[in-house]
Image (cartoon, grey):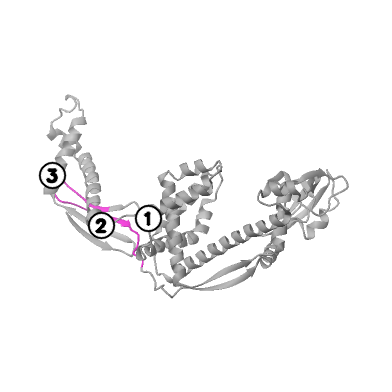
């Protein structure tokens, strides 16, 4: 077998393979014998048709079967010889074979490109957001807890701000006529909240059951008009923050002050996690922008195929696939690019998690659930190889980012949560 390798680009390989007849003859005879065993013709018993008759009548089919098997065999052999690992289905062209002559063909496929990492030690410059919480964060969290336990009381005197309206919503066209198929029934809305505040607040005040009102709701393309038919008006009766309430949500707290302090710790832990996620994204962005790397189209397409399949598997959700693929192609390319860069970084820095480290982490996770009904379930979960592999991958990534932080200059930017709330309200 002779193999010529051509690099069409950084990720496309073309193998031109030729195999002499002397190397093929024995296998060809085996294909003929197999074909003969299964052929049945008038005047002959099955498997007893003379070989000359078979070659005369079925030479085309035999050569096609033989060529297909031989291409697969020598393609696989050539990959091993050249130490190549395709990432997509190969395309065969220029196949040439006749009995008694050499077989030749060309096969094209994609491989993961070599990643030439940028100089990154002491070269990385990224920012890290440090989020500063305040008392309003605690007040809002505590209010959310109370609303979860709130009782609903029907209001007869007319709706006011913060009241809940149970409504049917009918979207209207520009002339004010109902749009078929654009009706939502039994939806709760809160007077004064989000799109039901602002100019709509006055319209939604003073309403009772069976009243109708027309409101305008902002959309991506401007606004849409809706007719709301009120079915009920309700007021939330919030529970007091008493001992029973405190113990229900935080068994370790004795007083409201204890509860609020523990809420602060939880909020700050979440903000710290958000900060870490944002920092990681900034590292990814730095490497993606600094690394000259062409991503194989097949990797992008495979990633998009998985995304589409995942969406379709969820409750049979309908999807404009062409539009979705178009919108997601750029972020998908970034994700695949980072996958390749991450892989190269792990190899370059020899980042690894030993079996003992993995086992210690599993034990630590299980122990954190000790005394909990879930502990046995968690233990069984991490006995599954795929779950242990996923955990090991997460641990390797954590080590990698810790290492990258030691190479980087990180500028910290303090951001108050009050500023984030203000931005959120402005974007509504």
Look at discs 3 and 2 and give the one toward the viewer. 2
Contact? badges 3 and 2 (CB < 8 Å)? no
Q: Residue pushed farthest left?
A: 22
Give the position of the C terminus as an image quadrant.
bottom right
Provide the secondary structure element on which disc 2 rests: loop
363 vs 149, nearest the viewer = 363
Instruction: Please provide percent x and percent y for residue 353.
Output: 39, 57
Judge from the rendering whether residue 353 lies leftward or rightward of residue 240; answer left or right. Answer: left
| Dot 1 or dot 3, earlier in sequence | 3
Instruction: Please provide percent x and percent y for residue 90.
Output: 31, 52
Provide the secondary structure element on which disc 3 rests: helix
Q: Which contiguous range is marked in magenta?
A: 93-115
406 vs 423, nearest the viewer = 406
34 vs 248, nearest the viewer = 248
Report which residue position mark 2 lands on. 83
Judge from the rendering whether residue 64 lies leftward or rightward of residue 217; answer left or right. Answer: left
Dot 3 crowding, Cα within 10 Å, few <14, some 14–19, many 20+: some
Q: CA distance from mark 3 to mark 2?
A: 27 Å
Q: Which mark is residue 354?
A: 1
Look at discs 1 and 2 and give the one toward the viewer. 1
Judge from the rendering whether residue 311 lies leftward or rightward of residue 226; answer left or right. Answer: left
Whether the magenta-drawn stretch holds residue 109 is answered as yes
Identified at 51% across, 53% down, the residue is 322
Look at discs 1 and 3 and give the one toward the viewer. 1
Dot 1 crowding, Cα within 10 Å, few <14, some 14–19, many 20+: few
Q: CA distance from mark 1 to mark 2?
A: 27 Å
Q: Which mark is residue 25?
A: 3
Provide the secondary structure element on which disc 1 rests: loop
101 vs 387, nearest the viewer = 387
């Amino acid at each position: 077998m002779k193999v010529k390798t051509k690099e069409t680009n950084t990720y496309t390989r073309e193998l031109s393979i030729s195999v002499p007849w002397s190397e093929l003859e024995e296998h060809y005879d085996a294909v003929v014998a197999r074909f003969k065993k299964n052929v049945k013709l008038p005047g002959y018993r099955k498997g007893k048709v003379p070989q000359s008759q078979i070659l005369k009548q079925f030479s085309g089919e035999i050569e096609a079967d033989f060529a297909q098997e031989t291409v697969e065999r020598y393609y696989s052999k050539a990959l091993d010889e050249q130490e190549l690992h395709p990432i997509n289905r190969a395309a065969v062209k220029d196949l040439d074979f006749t009995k008694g002559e050499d077989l030749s063909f060309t096969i094209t496929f994609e491989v993961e490109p070599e990643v030439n990492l940028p100089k990154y030690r002491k070269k990385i410059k990224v920012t890290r957001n440090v989020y500063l919480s305040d008392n309003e964060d605690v007040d809002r969290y505590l209010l959310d807890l109370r609303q979860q336990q709130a009782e609903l009381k029907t209001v007869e005197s007319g709706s006011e701000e913060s009241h809940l309206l149970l409504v049917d919503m009918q979207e209207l066209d520009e002339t004010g006529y109902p749009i078929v198929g654009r009706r939502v029934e039994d939806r709760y809305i809160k007077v004064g909240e989000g799109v039901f505040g602002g100019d709509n607040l006055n319209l939604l005040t003073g309403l009772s059951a069976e009243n109708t009102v027309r409101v305008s709701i902002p959309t991506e393309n401007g606004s849409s008009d809706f007719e709301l038919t009120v079915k009920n008006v309700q007021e939330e009766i919030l529970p007091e923050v008493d001992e029973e309430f405190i113990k229900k949500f935080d068994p370790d707290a004795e007083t409201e002050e204890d509860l609020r302090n523990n809420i602060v710790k939880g909020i700050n832990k979440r903000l710290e996690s958000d900060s870490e996620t944002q920092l990681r994204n900034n590292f990814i962005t730095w490497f993606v922008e600094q690394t000259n790397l062409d991503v194989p189209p097949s990797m992008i397409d495979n990633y998009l195929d998985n995304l589409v399949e995942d969406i379709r598997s969820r409750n049979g959700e309908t999807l404009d696939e062409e539009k979705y693929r178009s919108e997601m192609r750029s972020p998908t390319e970034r994700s695949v690019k980072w996958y390749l860069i991450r892989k190269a970084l792990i190899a370059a820095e020899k980042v690894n998690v030993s079996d003992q480290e993995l086992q210690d982490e599993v034990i630590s996770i299980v122990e954190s659930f000790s005394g909990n009904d879930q502990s046995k379930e968690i233990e069984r979960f991490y006995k599954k190889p795929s779950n242990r592999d996923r955990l090991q991958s997460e641990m390797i990534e954590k080590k990698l980012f810790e290492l990258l932080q030691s190479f980087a200059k990180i500028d910290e930017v303090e951001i108050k949560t009050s500023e984030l709330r203000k931005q959120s309200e402005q974007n509504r």
